[in-house]
């Protein structure tokens, strides 16, 4: 189906011209206060798969197929102007002409092949791309193998990827090994961002590349200081027109109140991840407003069933029944989010299970399950980051009390970063997480994160044989009715029978900003600063 979306030296003339040119650029520069810029301290989208990375990548990198995250959630043309299905395994895409990378090079089909190839995603010698098996030893490529996290992400994003074929100078084919009704959505994932092969070759190391990738977006990476700031500058060669901002500066401000105070004092133009209880105080000042709502992401509690007390599914099920989710939403979110129908979203369309619900709040059932399992109050660790998520600490305190009420002895263990969260140096138990749906099908969420190639199984927390078999069927079946039945069974296994996680609530994000800036929040962690979403 075809889709369309439309230093001092004698002064010279140039010396005197520079200030004049600089003065001529009247576009604003803005500062955005965030709690974190990147968990991996890189900007390579295949490495920085996080909510915080999602906020920034859209300004410097683009995919072949774009998604309208601000309004409709539909696919639209990106670096490809059109795409069509050749068969159940193949999507053909026409590349946009005249697209330039931030290094000045024109985007070609070879750059697309590189972006999906072994040097960037898979590791040398693993995948065919454009009919050539790259060795990773070509000029500029040696010593730049991606870290293991990158192939791991690639495998769960494109589980049956075969190759990218160049069929014409401006046309490529994405070829899968198996049928997949969701190929367009996978291509639209930011793992598939298109980067300059020449830029990759010119970088001294993989880390140098990953901290200043050369993309096609409206803003180029000017400076990135890990754990401090990211500065993006307008790329006036952008195919989509002159960007509306001269510079965007993202600065790390971990504490929510500090972000808000900086906004009110004029230090920042945007303050991200505002707590709901701050909104009214901010909006008492007529110069500011808060925008945002629920997004395509849910907050979860995740189980490591290797823990001695969590091996028994009945204990994990007791956890799920001890949670009064509505009380959390009412107490901490002032009704600005909701308890969803499990790990799914309405924009799944016909795959959405409208009659599904999260496990009911039933303390008596939780106590019964614990007695039946023989649980006697042994401690279970709960690894926690310091408000990485909005209201994270407050939510954890409420959860621990709810669990205590049914006899669960949960001990909070604060951690500094995700590496410490996943560390096996001590026994893991439960942890916080979130799960997004990057496109409108369950494979983008439940199998991508919890399936056989998903992060939860990759870190060795949980596995289930039937779940894994059905995940593969969901990814490869073209029978719509069967896919819907398979998805329901996956929910039954992961949420009720052998819990891998339990959904707490739908995620909502709130951004405080100057009211004179006309800018809309997305239904995602993403922030869009293109002309179509900016006014002042």
Image (cartoon, rainbow, N blue to C red):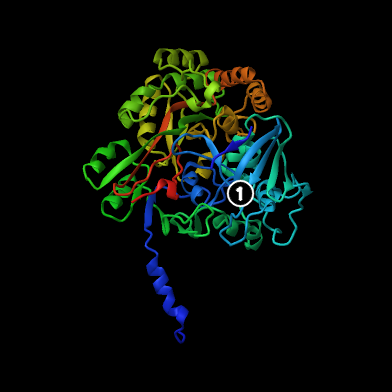
**Residue 411 to residue 211: above or below:** above
Q: Hey, which quadrant is residue 389 in on the image? A: top left
In percent of width and height, residue 83 lies at 63, 39
Q: In the rendered image, is residue 303 in sight?
A: yes
Q: Residue at x 46, y 28 (%)?
A: 379
**Residue 205 to residue 78: above or below:** below
SS under mark 1: loop
Q: Residue at x 51, y 52 (%)?
A: 240
Q: In the rendered image, is residue 459 in sight?
A: no
The residue most toward the bottom is 10
Q: Nearer the viewer, residue 312 or 37?
A: 37
Q: How many marks?
A: 1
In percent of width and height, residue 297 lies at 47, 33
**Residue 524 to residue 477: above or below:** below
In percent of width and height, residue 463 lies at 62, 27
| Quadrant including the N terminus | top right
In percent of width and height, residue 332 lies at 32, 31
Q: Nearer the viewer, residue 130 or 123?
A: 130
Left or right, 195 with reference to 404: right
- The residue indicated by pointer 1 is 96
Left or right, 382 with reference to 172: left
Q: Hey, which quadrant is residue 507 in on the image? A: top left
Left or right, 203 with reference to 258: right
Q: Hey, which quadrant is residue 448 in on the image? A: top right
Is disc 1 surrounded by few (<14), some (14 to 19) or many (20+) residues within 10 Å? Answer: some
């Amino acid at each position: 189906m075809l889709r369309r979306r439309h230093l001092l030296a004698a002064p010279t003339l140039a010396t005197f011209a520079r200030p004049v040119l600089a003065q001529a650029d009247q576009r604003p520069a803005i500062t955005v206060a965030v709690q974190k810029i990147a968990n991996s301290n890189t900007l390579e989208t295949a490495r920085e798969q996080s909510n915080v990375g999602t906020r920034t990548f859209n300004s410097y990198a683009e995919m072949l197929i774009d998604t309208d995250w601000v309004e409709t959630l539909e696919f639209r043309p990106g670096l490809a102007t059109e795409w069509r299905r050749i068969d159940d395994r193949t999507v053909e895409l026409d590349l946009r002409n005249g697209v330039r990378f931030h290094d000045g090079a024109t985007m070609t089909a070879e750059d697309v092949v590189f972006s999906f190839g072994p040097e960037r995603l898979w590791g040398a010698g693993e995948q065919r791309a454009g009919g050539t098996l790259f060795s990773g030893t070509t000029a500029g490529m040696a010593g730049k193998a991606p870290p293991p996290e990158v192939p791991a992400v690639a495998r769960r994003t494109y589980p049956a990827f075969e190759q990218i074929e160049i069929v014409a100078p401006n046309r490529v084919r994405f070829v899968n090994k198996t049928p997949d009704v969701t190929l367009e959505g996978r291509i639209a994932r930011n793992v598939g961002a298109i980067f300059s092969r020449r830029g990759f070759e010119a970088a001294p190391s993989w880390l140098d590349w990953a901290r200043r990738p050369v993309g096609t977006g409206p803003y180029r990476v000017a400076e990135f200081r890990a754990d401090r700031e990211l500065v993006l500058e307008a790329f006036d060669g952008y195919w989509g027109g002159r960007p509306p901002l001269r510079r965007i500066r993202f600065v790390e401000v971990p504490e929510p109140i500090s972000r808000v105070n900086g906004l009110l004092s004029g230090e920042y133009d945007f303050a991200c991840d505002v707590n709901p209880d701050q909104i009214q105080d901010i909006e008492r000042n007529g110069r500011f407003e808060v925008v945002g709502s629920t997004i395509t992401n849910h907050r979860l509690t995740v189980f490591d069933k290797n823990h001695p007390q969590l091996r028994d599914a009945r204990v994990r099920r007791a956890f799920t029944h001890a949670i009064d989710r509505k009380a959390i939403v009412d107490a901490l979110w002032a009704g600005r989010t909701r308890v969803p129908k499990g790990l799914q979203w309405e924009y799944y369309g016909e795959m959405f299970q409208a009659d599904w619900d999260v496990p009911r709040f039933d303390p008596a059932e939780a106590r019964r399950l614990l007695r039946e399992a023989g649980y006697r109050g042994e401690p279970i660790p709960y690894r926690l980051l310091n408000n990485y998520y909005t209201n994270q600490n407050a939510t954890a305190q409420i959860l621990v009390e709810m669990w205590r009420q049914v006899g669960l002895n949960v001990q909070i263990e604060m951690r500094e970063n995700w590496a410490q969260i996943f560390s096996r140096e001590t026994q893991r138990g439960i942890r916080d997480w979130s799960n997004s749906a990057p496109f409108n099908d369950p494979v983008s969420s439940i199998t991508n994160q919890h399936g056989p190639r998903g992060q939860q199984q990759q870190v060795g927390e949980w596995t289930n044989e039937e779940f894994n078999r059905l995940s593969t069927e969901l990814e490869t079946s073209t029978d719509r009715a069967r896919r819907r039945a398979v998805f329901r069974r996956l929910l039954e296994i992961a949420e009720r029978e052998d819990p891998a996680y339990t959904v707490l609530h739908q995620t909502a994000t709130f951004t405080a900003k100057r009211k004179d800036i006309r800018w809309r929040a997305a239904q995602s962690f993403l922030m869009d600063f293109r002309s179509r979403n900016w006014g002042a």
